[in-house]
Amino acid sequence: MKTRHTIPVDQFCGCCGYNLRTLPTVGNCPECGNAYDARASRMIGILRDEDINPPVGGWVVFVICVLLSGAFFYGAIKWRTRWNYAPAVLFLIFAAAYGRIALRRTARFVRHCKLLRQTREPH
């Protein structure tokens, strides 16, 4: 006889924070449809403290690209050289790309922090 494995403790969906307790160990969240695997060796799609990291690296790269772009624009204007405009624009494009990535990761980080706080509050 095959037994159905269920989640015996509070585990929360990594997307919406729904409590997956008593649901199958592997499946989809009934609230948002996010796929999860709550086996101890996998823990995919489950909200965990150790998965939440502030997106500091993306913001550091963004600031460096903005500073380099500004330096090249400054050099192009001060010394009236055209060759400084190309790297200035290139670093500005990199800054825009990394800024967008950092904003997305920051929004995800904030959402996960709110979900963790909600799951820890007594009902």
Image (cartoon, rainbow, N blue to C red):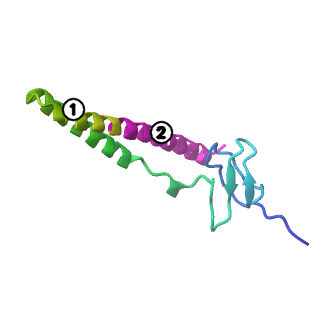
Q: In the rendered image, which quarter contains the C terminus?
A: top right
User: Which residue type carries mark 2?
Assistant: Arg
Instruction: Answer whether residue 110 is magenta in the image.
Output: yes
Q: Quadrant of residue 96?
A: top left
Principal secondary structure, stretch drawn in magenta: helix
Taking depth in this image into account, of 44 and 88 the one nearest to the observer is 88
Mark yes or no: residue 39 visible. yes
Q: Where does residue 112 sit, x and y in percent of width and height?
A: 54, 45
Label 1: how many Cα within 10 Å (few below 14, some 14–19, many 20+): some
Residue, x 54% and y 40% (percent of image)?
111
User: Which residue type carries mark 1?
Assistant: Tyr
Query: Which stretch appears magenta?
Result: 95-123
Q: Is residue 104 left or right of residue 56?
A: right
Q: Where does residue 68 sit, x and y in percent of width and height?
A: 22, 39
Q: Where does residue 35 sit, x and y in percent of width and height?
A: 69, 51
Taking depth in this image into account, of 92 and 54 the one nearest to the observer is 92
Q: Which residue is mark 2?
A: 104
Q: Which residue is mark 1?
A: 85
Most extreme residue toward the left, as rendered? 79
Residue, x 24% and y 38% (percent of image)?
87
